[in-house]
Image: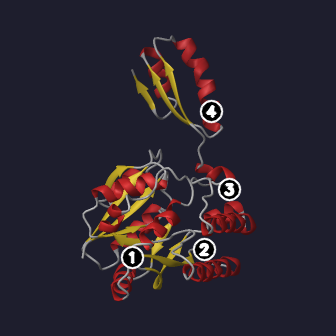
Amino acid sequence: MKISIIIPTYNEEEYLPDLLTSIQRQGFDDKEVIIADAHSVDSTIEIAESFGCKIVQGGLPATGRNNGAEVAEGELLLFLDADSVLTNNYISSAIEEFEFYNLGIAITQIVPLEKGFINQISHEFANYMTKQISHIKPHGAGCYGILTYKSLHEKVGGFDENIDFGEDTDYIERIGKISRFKVLDNPRLLISTRRLEEEGLRDISMKYARSTAKQLVGRKATLEELDYSFEHGSKRKQNRIFYSLCGEGLGHAIRSAVVIEYLIKEGYDLIVFASDRAYQYLSNKFENVYEI
């Protein structure tokens, strides 16, 4: 049975190589890897190409997952985050348990990549709570390693792209209504603790607790309510800006360079369009400068 592994990405050059290497080492040949990239400005695309991945247009996670599923050739779909790593024999173990229980959708329990007492305890508690809540309704806060059939994905219309937070739990609930759901006992998925380190255990726990409580009573939490971002650390970007210098002289280009440098330092994702001498000057100083 062929499996399509779908990974949404945005500036994941630090983590993606470890995940793709762990996929290569699975000893499971009937697979493909699809990267749904949201305009990364680092080497994410080059890394994906070097591993022979199929690459499609991404966006927010729901959009990326849907775009990946659309081109998937596998009967099974496995949705992963880019900062995770597969344990040995992950794919074969997951499929074996999936088929044994005649499941339609499943998620994986997690183990922290970074060691430490707090990391270990917090992730074991997350596993425990996920399994307990699953007895009430299909649910998966965090939703690491979502495994389902492409036919079921298509039947429910994929991920709801109108939901900006909890779209994975909504997806699990909808497929869980028409098939069997389970939190897999084996294998487990290694995941990065970067969000835990960025936001702290208390804050991230409160966000997921609030989100879970709302979802259990049929309500949806939003990114704005939870102050949540899908981007991380120093690579977190604000809005993308398109900066154009059409027919402007060198003096204006030099003055614009000061503004552009400031915006980049402030974390904006900048695309610059320039012509003539302005293009020659700015393209030697900055990336993402295009001639018009």
The alpha-carbon separation of the residues under discs 4 and 1 comes to: 49 Å
Question: Residue 240 lies in what quarter of the image?
Answer: top right
Q: Which residue lies under the disc numbered 1?
A: 179
Q: Give SS at disc 2.
A: loop
- Give how far across and how far down residue 178 sits, in percent: 39, 73
Q: Which residue lies under the disc numbered 3?
A: 226
Looking at marks 3 and 4 on the same chain, the residue that comes earlier in the sequence is marked by 3
Q: Who's the residue at 55% across and 52% down the image?
A: 164
Crowding near the residue tagged with mark 3, few <14, some 14–19, many ≥20 C-alpha atoms within 10 Å: some
Q: Give SS at disc 4.
A: helix
The alpha-carbon separation of the residues under discs 3 and 2 comes to: 25 Å
Q: Who's the residue at 70% across and 78% down the image?
A: 118
Q: Give SS at disc 3.
A: helix
Crowding near the residue tagged with mark 1, few <14, some 14–19, many ≥20 C-alpha atoms within 10 Å: some
Q: Which residue lies under the disc numbered 2?
A: 114
The alpha-carbon separation of the residues under discs 3 and 4 comes to: 26 Å
